[in-house]
Amino acid sequence: MSSLADRDKKHIWHPFTPQLGSEPNVPIVKGDGALVYDADGREYIDAISSWWVNIHGHANSYIANKVKQQLDQIEHVLFSGYTHEPAVRLAELLKKHLPYMDKVFYSDDGSTSVEVALKMAFQYWHNKGQVRTKVIAFENAYHGDTFGSMSVGARNVFSNAFAPMLFDVVHIPVPVQGREQESIAALKNAIDDNTAAFIFEPLVQGAAGMIMYEASALDELLHVCESSNVITIADEVMTGFGRTGKMFATDHCSFKPDIICLSKGITGGFMPLGATLCTEKVYSAYLTADRTKTFFHGHSYTANPLACAAACASLELFEQGEVLSSVERIAAFMKNAVEKLRQQSSVLDARVCGAILAVELKSPEATGYLNVVGESVAGFFQERGIILRPLGNVIYLIPPYCTTDDQLNKMVSAVREFADKLK
């Protein structure tokens, strides 16, 4: 009988993977905490939380038991005209952490949560009798792979094939150190009577290479938008649920967004789920007797009870008080590690934000997703029992919060070893 890897190769098209000459995929059969195991019993540290979703570790028994309990009650039910306890409970828990938000709209994943946010913002102006079509976003942005989310992202290898179909967006500089005032000036210059929204990844731009900037700069941008009556959309799909040291990245700011997009860590990595939260200001534009102003958007699996039960369980783990303490421990470890990494001759930059560590390696090519340095990274770490996918010449660590200090040491030591190899 053919191996699982051979059967996979024959039938499956994997994401973000060149189809000619790609290596066989490693069959994973079990997970436990920060570890996963392949079909041969070899263990790997999941250094990137399986694309940033698995915040509590694999096979978390608390979440698993809550999902099992939900399976015996109701697996799914339509969410128009009907509701259920897990969806309501989850909305209550999310609003407890985001008290300035008024309503929660459920979808399927991060990209669709952004689609919902954009449509929500555009229709907000439509419902108020105004036509506003301009969106402002950051350079290097990544907000997902559906058409609206691609439109507000950077024009790059992810979206080049679809460029003629994307709507125009004004991109402004990211307010990284030394460019704060340039970014603020660009935002002010871009805002006019046609501006519908400003969308941003707060504090950390993930797919762009873990580009980081300060909350004080974001606060100024949010203040400009509030003063100009521009809807603000925080894409917290990656930064939410503790990654930056606080529950949400926008918790670092004094000014708050009008709309927040959530996914990835929302269910602890158990089930796909997206959520878009909005303020009373936004929601009020839909409180009308005019049925043509209804928000006509939905998904077959909107507010899936199993996913909502997993998300509730994940948030309950946060409320037990130990999770953010683990984030603080990992953040302290990362902060100490980054100082040593900066001293290595092959390191162009090393940066940290909460429990996220990024190392930008020197290269004859410009920093970017297709940088040649990245071609050998995954294999190097896989040989050392670590799952890690680079962003071109940027290696990053974004581990589950249950990761031990020994596991963190192993990851950072491997990063230093790889950097030494480039001398």
Image: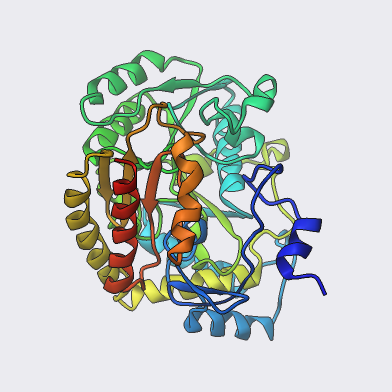
Q: Image quadrant for the N terminus?
A: bottom right
180 vs 187, nearest the viewer = 180
- Residue at 80 percent across and 70 percent down: it is 2
Q: Is residue 390 left or right of residue 97?
A: right
Q: Is residue 201 above or below residue 412?
A: above
Looking at the rendering, which quadrant does residue 206 occupy?
top left
Colour convention = rainbow
Q: Image quadrant for the C terminus?
A: top left
Say if residue 253 shows up in the picture: no
Q: Is residue 299 above or below residue 294?
A: below
Q: Position of residue 45 (x, y in %)?
A: 43, 68
Q: Position of residue 132 (x, y in %)?
A: 55, 21
Q: Position of residue 418 (x, y in %)?
A: 35, 50
- Residue at 55 percent across and 25 percent down: it is 155
Looking at the rendering, which quadrant does residue 281 occupy?
top left
381 vs 304, nearest the viewer = 381
Say if residue 56 shows up in the picture: yes
Q: Position of residue 59 (x, y in %)?
A: 52, 78
Q: Is residue 373 above or below residue 248?
A: above
